[in-house]
Structures are given as C-alpha cells and as structure tokens.
Image: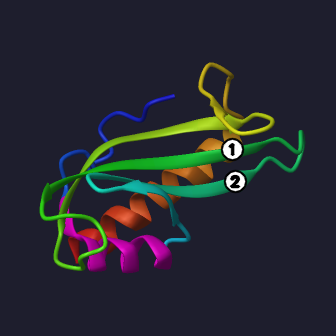
Amino acid sequence: MIFENTGLDGLRSDLAYLDESAEKAGFVRWQWEYYRATYDYKIEDSKSKNEYFLRINTRVIEGKLEKPDTILSVEAVYIGRATFPHGLEYESEIPAPVMSLANEKIKQLKELLEA
C-alpha cells in the first residue's frame, strides 16, 4: 500500500541528516546502492503475529551514497506484509493498529526532517 499526502514525498535531506533522523524514528537503512536507499521500520501485529515493513524510498539528487553530504529526495512511502523468505506483499489489508503506528512514524520522521 502506498501512502499518499504524507508530506515526505519530494522532501530533500543530506544523507548524514537523513540517516540520523531515520534512526531516531526507529528506521533502519537496509537497502542501498549508489543512487538509491530505502529506510524500513518493522511493525509486528500482536494479533496475527505478521510482520509489516513501513518503507521510505529515496533517490540521490546530488552526489553518491556513503558520502555524508549527498542529497537525497524521498520518492515514496509504502507498507507491506513480510513474506518468506524475502519480500513484501502489498495487496493484503493492513490491520488498524499497524496503520496507526505507521502513520505515527511517518509524522515523526517528517517532523525530524523538517527541524
């Protein structure tokens, strides 16, 4: 599921500040390559025991990843249910408590990036 109107889409930050802000909000930069990085926040549904990942996609605007002054732009924010062995499934309905926490984390990250 893609989140619309988060206020994060198009937001720009240097890599060092984005990493620091994402870490404060509980996100981890899992995937990265020279021009793209994703930040994930893991949410476990206590009822079903399913795991969900809130994912923030970013793309390099200036520079190359692993240089702290590289500028990234947020491209998309989405959530999916973890599947075995590796992957996310985006078609399942997301439980309300998971969506609530995901929206809180989006808001928290936005506030940190705008500070």
Name the amino acid type tagged 2.
Ile
**In the rendered image of this protein, does residue 48 appear above or below residue 17?**
above
Marks 1 and 2 in Cβ contact (< 8 Å): yes
Residue occupying image coordinates x 32% and y 69%? 111
Residue highlighted by disc 2: 43
- What residue is disc 1 on? 52
| Residue at the limit of the structure toward the top, as seen here | 91
User: Within the image, what quadrant is residue 108 found in?
Assistant: bottom left
Q: Which residues are magenta?
A: 12-24
Residue 28 belongs to the span the image colors magenta: no
Name the spot of residue 110 as percent of width and height, x first.
Answer: 32, 62
Quarter of the picture holding the C terminus = bottom left
Vertical arrangement, residue 20 with respect to residue 63, above or below: below
**What residue is drawn where x is 61% and y is 54%?**
101
* 66 w.r.t. 94: above or below: below
Q: CA distance from mark 1 to mark 2?
A: 5 Å
| Residue at the spot 51% in from the left edge and 58% down from the top edge | 104
Q: Is residue 69 left or right of residue 75?
A: left
- Residue 93 image position (x, y, % from top left): 67, 24
Q: Is residue 92 left or right of residue 9?
A: right
Mark sitting earlier along the chain (1/2): 2
Q: Overall secondary structure of the magenta stretch?
A: helix
- Could you tell me how many numbered marks the image carries? 2
